[in-house]
Amino acid sequence: MSWHGTKGNPRLHIVTGKGGTGKTTVAAALAAVLADEGSRVLLVETEERQGISQILDVAPLGTEETEVGTGLEGGEIYGLSIEAGTALVEYFQLFYRLGRAGDLLQRIGAIEFATTIAPGVRDVLIGGRIYEAVGRTASQTPGSRRRRRPGDPPAYDAVVVDAPPTGRIGRFLDVTGQLANLAKVGPIRSQADSVAALLHSPTTVVHVVTLLEQLPVQETLDAVRDLSADGLRIGALVVNQARDADTRRAVDLVAASTPDHDHLAAQLESVGIRTSASMIEGLLQTGAEAVERRDLEVSLETAVQDAGHPVLTLPHLPEGVGPDAVRHLAAELAAQGVTRGGTP
Amino acid sequence: MIDLDMSGLLDDPTTGVIVCTGAGGVGKTTTAAALALHAAERGRQVVVLTIDPARRLAQALGLTELDNTPRPVIGVDTTAGGSLDAMMLDMKRTFDEVVLSHADPETAQQILDNPVYQALSSSFAGTQEYMAMERLGQLRTQAVAEDSWDLIVVDTPPSRSALDFLDAPQRLGSFLDGRFIRLLAAPARAGGRLGVRALGVGMSIAGATVGKLLGKQFLLDLSTFVAAMDTVFGGFRARADETYQLLKDPGTRFVVVAAPERDALREAGYFVHRLEHEGMPLAGLVLNRVAVSRARISADRARDAAESLEESGDRHTAALLRVHADHAETAARHRRLIRDVVAANPRLATVQVPLAGADIADLPALRNVAEALTTP
């Protein structure tokens, strides 16, 4: 089975996960693997948090695609922060030739209105911008209406989206359902239909990032169930910030031993550590808690494995995240079989 | 470093409302539940309003369904004469109740059936925050009227940012009172074309554009909605302001919760400044899930000793030393992060809750958290 678990050769990778699980970092690492030699990958931010630019240590992303780095094997990574208001103005300019009327709309609050009346409209606009980037060909410029030439390769070999968290991902991807009652006709409606068709096609997979903690795993399993029910393709489940093998081995050994104060004290004294009753007590408590956490993690890991999708595991990086950490994680992903695969 | 006297705060009869805020995933709900439990077992009549509790914590509090009604929590020690009720916020139902209590049945139904209302009440970014405040206001009124609760503990929605809790209600208010929504709704009220003409050509282009985008039916739904809401509330912004004022009440105390991670602490810092700026009563910062080294051996020393023991000694002891070394390293990192946040906010009172082995999912575990919260 492929690393993403689907049969096709997906080009649009949606990355979600509970807040705080590191989905932005994982999205950046995934982009770095997919950007193999000679290819171009677009890394998209959808919530205007500027998380990508912080992690990659580049200037804040704007609403125009700019190069933000190179992939593990030398491909180009472009970054984009999609902002609903700008997407709407672009949309007006494109379809209604409104030109400067966009400014007017901005001034009287129409943009704010259309993007806040319901997150549905906002999500359709963001989805529309992603749709455009995925469908664009190498000879087209962003937003151009020039017809694509047959045989023209796509502008991006892969598009990775740092999507909203699991709590909102269902709504974000259900662009048509959200508009069901609100806009029954009109261009926003047809835009939503095109976006929905792309999201439900083999071009798209949704990856879910989790930690081995109760709440993130619960939300991951809920998301997998709900998104599958909505007809979306689940790709990999990414267990982030996992303990390394050495730590696990040590905890396993601690679990296999019976606590004995005197023996422990004698062993420590034998390597020159002066012990006290409270120190021994403290060490044993630390060990017991680590074993308790391990047991919880093991059961959660089993639950993730049993969800029926490929599982990728990334190590905990205590020094925090930055461009180096992203490359480190990208190498981990590559070692676990993540590759762009095939030519489109 | 100033210690946060949580015990004194909970015992103080003038403390009527405690709002727990912070970024998502830092343990706000657990903190709120632990504080409420502690106060109840010390003799206060407490209700805790949770927003999105983890499943097992919800079960521990008896919150098996989302029904918006406070119910007694089973297993609370009431020997001191206190009590604890818990409830989970149902945002849509709260909004519906606001409409139902302010409008005659016919107008209320008209609003509830309106598609714009339905979108707004279930998915507008900020509705949850607004409704949490609204529900807090309702509980206060109820507490006074029935002489029931003397302490309300509120958890806040799992927002992207803690600031959303303060900003969202006004955003919803100013949105509903905004120029553009008024303009779009104008034809229905001012009598069709006349209203449009009076607003000028630019405005009518904008209105027509939105009509084109979302369809004419949408405009109709929208103007019906705005007209109906107007008859119910007068101004929505005024109502939002009123709810906001509630938070400045002298009996209200904010507790900011943060985990010892860079992002969560930065977020907490923003929120602390904002509360100070707005003149809102900040009790202090709860540093949740802090790793504390339990044995006085440095990580390096423990690793050296482990290496020696692996060569000629007991590998179980060596393993225990390695586990301790990892933990001691995390503890040192947490200490550095906390030192920095305290240095940046010297007048901020703090309390630390140590990292627990497993999830907090029953009353004894909540009591342990409360114990840590109330003993600086």
Image (spheres, rainbow, N blue to C red):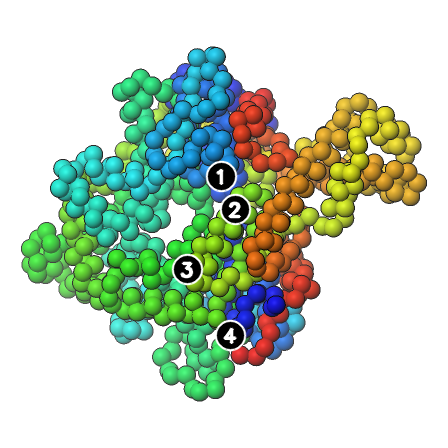
Mark 3 and mark 4 lie on one chain; the one further toward the N terminus is: 4
Chain bearing tag 4 is: A
Are the numbered discs 4 and 1 placed on the same chain, yes or no? no
Amino acid type assigned to the residue bearing label 4 in the image: Tyr
Residue A156's disc is 4
Percent coordinates x, y for residue B265 in the rendering:
55, 40
Label 1 element class: loop
Q: Nearer the viewer, mark 4 or mark 2?
A: 2
Cα separation between marks 3 and 4: 27 Å
Percent coordinates x, y for residue B330 in the rendering:
68, 40
Label 4 element class: loop
Residue A218's disc is 2
* Location of mark 1 (residue): B54
Question: How many residues crowd mark 1 within 10 Å: few (<14), some (14–19), many (20+)?
Answer: some
x 90%, y 34%: residue: A271
Residue placed farthest to the bottom in the image?
Answer: A150
Q: Is A206 on the left or on the right of B99, as rendered?
A: right
Asked which quadrant contains residue B233, the reply is top left
Cα separation between marks 4 and 1: 40 Å
Residue placed farthest to the top in the image?
Answer: B80
Label 3 element class: loop
* Location of mark 3 (residue): A230
